[in-house]
Image (cartoon, rainbow, N blue to C red):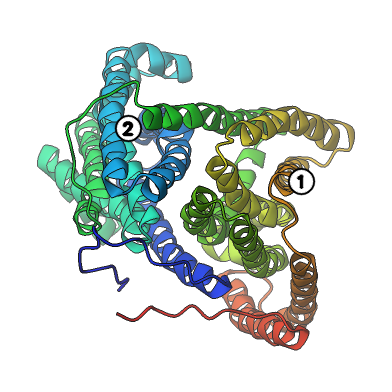
Amino acid sequence: MISEPTAPVAAAAPPADAGGRAVLARRASVVSIAVLASRVLGVVREQIFAVFFGAGRELDAFITAFRIPNLLRDLFAEGALSAAFVSTFTQYLERGGEAAAWRLASLVINTLLIVVGTITLIGMWIAPDVVLAIAPGFAAIPGKVGLTVGLTRIMFPFLPLVALAAVAMGILNTRNVFGVPASAAAFFNVGSIVGGLGAAYWLAPAYVRGVLGAVATHHAAPTDPALAARAITGMAIGTLIGGLLQFVVQVPSLGRVGFRYRPVLHPSDPGLRQVMRLMAPATIGAAAVQVNVFINNNFASYLGNGPVSWLNVAFRFMQLPIGLFGVALGTVTLPLVSRHVARGDRAALRRTLAESLELVGLLCLPAAAGLALFAVPVIGLIYEHGRFTPADTTAAAQALAAYTAGLAGYAGIKVLAPAFYALDDARTPMLVSLVSIGVNYVLNWTFVRRLGFGHVGLALSTSAVALGNFALLYVVLRRRVGPLGSRLPVALARIALAAAVMAAVAGGLDFVVAAHLPPAGALRHALRLAVAMPVAAACFWVTCRALGVAVPMPRRRRG
């Protein structure tokens, strides 16, 4: 169980930064565990939807309805808001004291409730027009538009709930509390599952009992569209319950760190204006990412049946190390670099960034090598069932191998971007994201249309853009704060060598083992992973030690 502070610390300053990769690794490990729990529960949530609704009218309507508030969340309610708020909140905490910082937090919360609440009400009002704009084909199926509109109106209030959760997460992270806020997403999934099933049973008990009975007896599930619509409405209510739980679970920790809510509103407050000023370019940068996704889907749609699904499956596996390592390190780095900037300690800022990037290499380079090497058994073990054939596994594995080339770039961006926000510069990450739109299009056209790489070319383009974005951010930041030290490139070179040795040893062993296994099937995939992965991990650790690369072993703090 992840421990959290149990005594109030309102009158105390945040713990001193102990420095070193061990501190970052310990804090990041807490976030990584929570992210892993959230990912597992997310898979369970998807499986529940598949069991109860299949790939039909109801699930199409739910996914489309949830995509609207979820898109707004991706644009500004989480990443942009958290980065802008944490850097400003840290400045107030360091320079103005706790009273000024708590007042700023209340101002941000109250302003968000008004602004996001207004957006929510407008969204609920114009829901029919929004649904027809993003899913015009639904009009051809009786009742599908109406169901989607109803679900959209139910789930739009998810947006203010997740905005409040983002502010709470920012406050707690700034006070060096990472476990509870990182676990909030897992609580969202728990609330969605338990609350959704409970609401579905309340609205359509016969449908829920019928599906459970069909699963138990292997008979056909009920198909009454009216009951199915009521049940999916219950799952939409469950999404709201999950969103509320995501915020409420953090409230006790807010009290323990000393936060007291105040009903204040001052639109011209300098701190509030700074948060909004930083949020604007961050939101534009997030929108650029969404545009790149649209461009990739557009190119993939011309490649026939399969590529969109193969790319989606491959990137799902990429999201796990990005979340476990990149997001976790970015989360713990943001309050640290914000504190260094507020104190004017550029040496500590450079040291923290160098240590974070070294951890990115230590975690992501072997992960990338492992995913590329074992893409076929990893994807085949989980997805190669029913209509997902071995050919699909091979195609998705090719895409995953191409995606892994950019894994370290993805994670590195999560570390570098917070430094720009801490330096009161949200413009540079925004410009880099906007430049990436043009680069992504040119690379897609070159790899797919000119070189004929197919869906693998789209994955390669995505990786190249990630690496290019990271390189640009690194060069600009180095000019802003100075060199990050001579140790970093040497350490990364040694880590890369250790990852290469690991890949050679594990790949050779896998080649020998695979020759004595069944030609296909889940057993073959499972045995390949069971034999090779422990050897790969041990080989990487031994090689790192032989090359003088320190591998921090995160330990729980006492007291």
Q: Are marks 2 and 1 in contact (CB under 8 Å)?
A: no
Q: Which circle, 2 or 1, is nearer the viewer? A: 1
Q: Could you tell me the amino acid type at mark 1? A: Val
Residue under numbered circle 1: 475
Does the rendering let one see residue 64? no
Decide if residue 151 is on the left or right side of residue 345: left
Residue situated in front as seen by the camera: 335 or 148: 335
Task: Give the residue drawn at x 34%, y 58%.
Answer: 183
**Quadrant into which the C terminus falls:** bottom left
552 sits left or right of 185 in the view: right
Q: Residue at x 53, y 54 (%)?
A: 340
**Camera-side residue: 4 or 137?**
4
Q: Position of residue 533 (x, y in %)?
A: 63, 78
- Circle 1 packing at 10 Å, graded few (<14), some (14-19), many (20+), is few
**Mark 2 is on which residue type?**
Leu
Q: Position of residue 349 (x, y in %)?
A: 60, 56
Is any atom of residue 178 visible in this view?
yes
Q: Judge left or right: residue 98 versus residue 81.
A: left
Task: Report which residue position mark 2 lands on.
Answer: 159
Q: Where does the N terminus fall, quadrant-wise?
A: bottom left
Q: Which mark is residue 257?
A: none
Residue 555 placed where, x, y %? Answer: 44, 80
Whether residue 235 is situated above or below residue 42 in the rendered picture: above
Residue at 34% from the left image edge and 81% from the top image edge: 558
Residue 364 occupies quadrant: bottom right
**Residue 282: x %, y % from top left:** 53, 33
Rendering quarter of residue 444: top right
